[in-house]
Image (cartoon, rainbow, N blue to C red):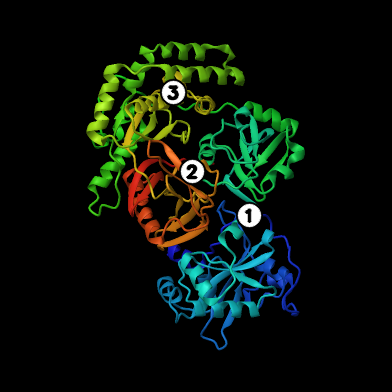
Amino acid sequence: MARSLFKIGILTAICFCCANTDVFADGGKNRQSRTSDKVASVAKSQDIIPDAATFDAFARTERAGRFMELPQVMFAIDRSKVPARVIWINTKQYRFHYDYLRSAYLTLADAEIFNATNYSRPDRRFLLGSVVRYPRLVRYGVEFWEGDILQSELLAGAMRDLQESFFVPLTFKPNSDSQREAAAKAGLTTIGIEEAYGSAEQLVLNPGRAVGRLMLVADGDENALLPGDIALLTTVPVRMPPVAGIISASFTTPINHISLLAKTWRIPNAYRNGADSLFAALIGKQVVLDTRKSPVVIREATVHEIAENAKFRRLRAVQAAPADVTYSGLPTLSEQDAKWSRRTGAKAANLAEVAALARRDPYHMFDVPEGFSVPFSFYERFVVANKIDQQINRLLDDPRLSDAECRTKELARIRQLFAQGHIPPTDFAMIASKRLSLLGDKGVFVRSSTNAEDLPRFNGAGLYDTLPNVKASEDLERAIKTVWGSLWNDRAFAARESAGINHRSVRAAILIQRGIDADAAGVMTTIDPFDENADERRLFLAAKRGLGIRVVEGKKIAEQLIYRPDLNSVQVLTRSQDDVMLHFGPGGGIEEIQTIADRAVLADALVARLGKIGLAIQSAFDGRPQDIEWLVVGGRILIVQSRNYVKGH
């Protein structure tokens, strides 16, 4: 019943905003207000919205940490009347259209029948939607549930009826491709997805509270941050060391590496429009960052708050998973399962489970590219043979390790030792032979799979390197050493240090997979990262054309979608703003190709297929929400990673 009711009252605005402040003059028709604020606050409904004060009195703003945090007033257009009657519903009193219509005895149908007869059918009695205010756009938009199929004539009539009873001009904001097509056919002006996204004042990516030194971070300066800092980002970096909190002046998404790491670090993380100028006076000072409420707050910390924070800075230690360094086989994915994580790392072992699911699937919904693992024992033999283990122990015993500049220099020296080292000839011969026999001489992906990622309370997203489209044998050896060496890069070391992971226990395995040059790729979470505690099932997808590397970097906004499997609806949050896509280069590696931004990447039918696959994978992992990397080639879906989704606070 609850999921059926959700459909009835759904609003699909896409952006966050601040308070319900009145930013509009009464530019509409000169009507006498029928209701005072006091009366409007208790009225169930009325026939007109004559002014902004009445809109505010009727409006509700969701504050559940969701992507859509804008004031809205629900409406129902009763088409059984001639002319049609517009009913403005007190949205503070009623969460769903159905609740109001039942209370007013305008329908006696149960929820299922109501749904079937009042969505998508041209002869429906009721048209149900909401009017949303976008403060920074200085506009009001009409929105319908994204799964509502609106015929162009029906939509045009609805806009005329609504305008007659609203005090300022209304503009239609489509929430699906079919609605956009209907608006175009009806000749309606629309509010575009990117316009609405641009009206966002803030977006909470992880709620929480932190005390620390507010540091303005220019592009490229993120490595100078310390664990006690609160980073004020002017642009979102691909990677950064652990900090106490993040506030970004540049819009970001919940699935890029920084957002995922913020959840792992359990720190507050939010976008706030104009944060760099808004909080300029506090830069360099000890502040409190609070992302639990709207609007996001940054204020100077008191002496007491600074002292209390010092007591609780030490995080609870995370244990690296045990690593078996005795096993020396090169198992294919089909030879592994989840228990192999001690030999081949969590990433490879999890993907082996996904591959097994694909083989069992009678409908052949998806594939996993073939591959094999190079287990921890090969890493262990390499560091011993090249005496790098001695240098690592010397580094970890060095008292200067607490100095950031010295640590960066020493870690670079360790990585250089990896690059200059030689894989024992017998070991590399085994790897090269396995690659040729299983995967041929085409390009392969060389992926990290360590025992220091995908742990409880430690995601590890983006910490270690992956090299795409590796072809020549000498390039393969170089790629393996690069991935092993990435265990000792600054960001990974700092993340483990912050989580209390013992560096001496960390080992790197490698997953070598058939390279697939994708038409489109991205990330899917089987939980809504904007509202992790929602009762309704929602999946989040982010996609770009070409390879998926740029999706998780967060430099350019990806296409972002919410899929509701119970309603089979696709809500478009943003279109991809990236005008570059990545493809395999003919000699190896990747190359950039220009493309056109702001076009749909995924068709609705493909989103539904991905959603079905995501839920099947979640079920295979005992119902734990998953963070899944996928790609599409010629309509075929392939899964290349699945890890447990780490919830925030």
SS for callout 3: helix
Q: Where in the figure is residue 499, as x and y percent of width and height?
A: 51, 28
**How far apart, in angstroms, are the residues tagged by discs 1 and 2?**
23 Å
**619 horizontally vs 135: left or right:** left
Q: Amino acid at mark 1?
A: Ala
- Indicate whether 576 appears above or below 512: below
The residue under label 1 is: 200
The residue under label 3 is: 485
Q: What's the residue at 38%, 36% (across, down)?
A: 587
Q: Quadrant of the C terminus?
A: top right
Q: Nearer the viewer, mark 1 or mark 2?
A: 2
* First in sequence: mark 1 vs mark 3: 1
Q: What's the residue at 40%, 44% (across, down)?
A: 629
Q: Nearer the viewer, mark 1 or mark 3?
A: 3
Q: Nearer the viewer, residue 187 or 299?
A: 187
Q: What's the residue at 52%, 67% (across, down)?
A: 9
Instruction: Residue 200: name its quadrant.
Output: bottom right
SS for callout 2: helix
Q: Mark 1 near mark 2, Cβ–Cβ under 8 Å?
A: no
Q: Amino acid at mark 3?
A: Gly
